[in-house]
Amino acid sequence: MITKNPHANWTGMIAFIGCMAATTVFFIYVLAFQPGPVDQTKTPAIGLTKEQYIERKEVWIKSTPEAIARGEASYKLNCAFFYQEGKTDKFLEMFKSGDLPNKGTELEIFRMISKGNTEQGIMKIDHIREDERWDIVHYLRSLNTNLPSTSRSDWKQFFKEGA
């Protein structure tokens, strides 16, 4: 004859509740104290005046070696897995060869990666901050120095659209 132990279920229930409590405390700790992969030192553009936003854009659109390096790292983190087929990154090859769906100016590349282009199989990357997208633009343009620059009138229109 098998007898049932009435305390066995309570022991399991207490262990379960203890694990759930520990998991909840750990989850709250991670949310509250861990910054995660996003750079928390940069302030968002939300709440800026139009003039402040344009000042930031003027910094973002300048290609520097630092911006290119940040863009390469950001591309590898946020974009590369979309385009890799085997060991070749078709998207980077498109930039290196200059075989782009548009001229390849700074603004065209920014708009292309911000909005995507389903006809060309280009994924939009609007999930990352605008300054990081500009860094990616600088990195992609660094792959081919023969790409044309944005015209002065296009820049003026861009800054009018800005804020």
Image (cartoon, rainbow, N blue to C red):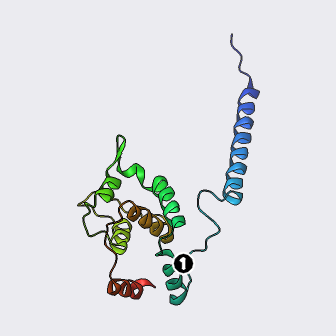
Res 126 seen here: no
Kindly identify the amino acid type of the residue bearing the numbered disc 1: Ala
Q: Quadrant of residue 147?
A: bottom left
- Rendered location of residue 27, percent (x, y): 67, 51
- Foreground residue among 51 and 72: 72
Q: Secondary structure at mark 1?
A: loop
Residue identified by numbered label 1: 45
Residue at 74% in and 22% down: 5
Where residue 34 appears, as percent x and y from the top left, is 68, 56
Residue toward you, 94 or 38 = 94
In this rendering, the answer to whether 148 lies above or below 75 is below
- Residue sitting farthest toward the front: 146
At 33% from the left edge and 57% from the top edge, which residue is drawn? Answer: 96
Query: Residue 26, how many percent across, how many down?
Result: 71, 49
Q: Quadrant of residue 103?
A: bottom left
Residue plotted at (49% across, 53% down): 77
Front in this rendered view, residue 96 or 40: 96
**Residue 82 visible (yes or no):** yes
Q: Residue at x 38, y 65 (%)?
A: 141
Q: Is residue 140 left or right of residue 25?
A: left
Residue density around tag 1, few if under 14, some if 14–19, many if 20 or more, within 10 Å: some
- The image shows residue 120, relative to residue 81, as above or below, that is below
- In this image, 155 relative to 3: left or right? left
- Left/right placement of residue 35 relative to residue 155 reads right
Q: Count the numbered circles shown.
A: 1
Query: Position of 66 compared to 22: left or right?
Result: left
Quadrant the N terminus occupies: top right
Residue 128, image x, y percentages: 48, 64
